[in-house]
Image (spheres, rainbow, N blue to C red):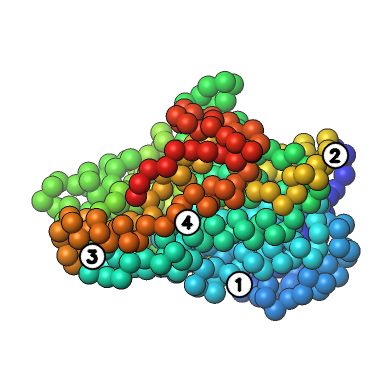
Amino acid sequence: MANQKLSVISLFTGAMGLDLGLEKAGFAVRVALECNKFAIETIKANRPDLPLITDKIENVTTQQILEKAGLKPGEAALVVGGPSCQPFSTAGQRHSVSDPRGEMFKEFLRVVREARPRFFIMENVRGVLSAAIKHRPLKQRGPGFPPLSQDEQLGSAFKLILSELQDTGYYVMFDLLNAADYGVPQMRERLVFIGSRDGELLKMPEQTHAKEPTKGRKRWLTLRAGLRRLNDEQPTFHEFVPRNKKYMSRIPPGGNWRSLPKPMQAKAIGGAYKSWGGRCGFLRRLSWQRCPPALTTAPDGRATMLCHPDELRSLSTKEYAKLQQFPARWKFAGGVPQQYIQIGNAVPVGLGQALGKAIRKVMRKRKGNKALKGKVACTNTNLLERLAKRPTTIINPKRMRKIKGDKATRAWLSKSRHDRSEILQLIFTPNAEPHPNGAQPEGAEQRRNGHCRVKHRKA
């Protein structure tokens, strides 16, 4: 088993970050499917002999995919991919499932149902957890606007995804994983679903690193450690616009717009100054001594900036690729913006390897359980508690609302509130455990009939 190459069908392949990690764990990619022209050229430049389908997944039948891979239904070990995440990302327009790209997870599951791989891995952004089936902009929420429909409440899209996963007949486990916990020099959270056709007892990969080293885990890798031995004497990067350069020259390593003198802050970030939320990506300079944040697809953007600790520039494309753990000789097609997008959207190689190793461990045991088939499980009680406490919606602060009265706000929220317990009833908790980086929340162990029973808080 240790030397056996196991077949992978790769969908939404991109720059092949996940695939490279799986290969390091002993798997072999038999076919890739990608429709982005720059990602296609990247795949061809690095893997010219890999069977490649260059079309949208909705235009391709599962039989065509299997034939290209030289496989029959049931023969593949893995179907993997990250359906388009822009509709769910907090950096995007949050169109959710109403955006055609939000339907791509159904296309992924269609291939799983028809190809019948032994396992599948589907990954996406953490925003999937709170996405709505139908997105309503913040400025159209609150008193003075119609109450939310059930499809507009936070988490309604995730509920739909859980239901679709149940319909596959696979035993599915999900969790929110931080790539930094697996030796990746980057705090990058991804929502990961692992499915087993035969009901094998799934486990998420064990952490090897932590923010604070405990229980044999090493400390998260810093930016300096992540870029060690990188040869990038003539870095390729996007120049900051002069306006941003002026401000960035005053910001120390590890700082952002809040490091500027108070009178300068409002002018530096414009209208966002009167907004709300963390805004930590505005005019951000990295620190050599800290683990970097998740790489964005536009490190020169004012709100998504990733400035070099010492130099007045964004991280270079080579530095990006190094932090995502791509091989030094891996080539990326397109201009600088397209390279940033491909690298920034990729799954870090180290996270892919950790997932591959976790599945190989399950494979060695060969223990299926028919009773688990069709269940969707989560053993992270911290995550379950967050899902239980999640509000129905988020509205603007009082100063930004059309009608500012508290009574009107409470009435609108009351009419917009829908039952959130349904989503927890879809989640099976076979062996709930606290997340290694957090304390177990009160009430998280109250379970009945395999379902987690957590205390609910009013929105």
Report, in whole angstroms, how far the alpha carbon at label 2 lies from the one at label 4.
35 Å
Instruction: Name the one closer to the observer, 111 or 411.
Output: 411
Report, in whole angstroms, how far the alpha carbon at label 3 lies from the one at label 4.
21 Å
Contact check, label 2 and label 3, Cβ < 8 Å:
no
Quarter of the N terminus within the rendering: top right
Closest to the camera, between mark 1 and mark 3, is: 3
- Residue 100 occupies quadrant: bottom right
Report the residue marked by disc 2: 366
Report, in whole angstroms, how far the alpha carbon at label 2 lies from the one at label 3.
56 Å
> Judging from the image, what secondary structure is the residue with disc 3 in?
loop
Give the mark nearer the N terminus: 3 vs 4: 3
Tell me the crowding category of disc 4: few under 14, some 14 to 19, or many 20 or more residues within 10 angstroms, Cα based. Answer: many
Report, in whole angstroms, how far the alpha carbon at label 1 lies from the one at label 3.
42 Å
Q: Position of residue 117 (x, y in %)?
A: 80, 56
Identify the mark at residue 155; answer none if there is no mark: 4
Instruction: Name the one closer to the observer, 212 or 196.
Output: 196
Contact check, label 2 and label 4, Cβ < 8 Å:
no
Closest to the camera, between mark 2 and mark 1, is: 2
> Judging from the image, what secondary structure is the residue with disc 2 in?
loop
Report the residue marked by disc 1: 36
Q: Position of residue 222 (x, y in %)?
A: 47, 35
Report, in whole angstroms, how far the alpha carbon at label 2 lies from the one at label 1.
37 Å
Residue 208 in the image: above or below residue 4 = above
- Residue 300 occupies quadrant: bottom left
Specify the amino acid type for callout 3: Pro
User: Would residue 328 appear left or right of 414 to someone viewing this image?
Assistant: right
Which residue: 33% across, 40% down? 254
Instruction: Name the one closer to the observer, 272 or 250.
Output: 272
Tell me the crowding category of disc 3: few under 14, some 14 to 19, or many 20 or more residues within 10 angstroms, Cα based. Answer: many
Contact check, label 1 and label 3, Cβ < 8 Å:
no
Residue 305 in the image: above or below residue 353 = below
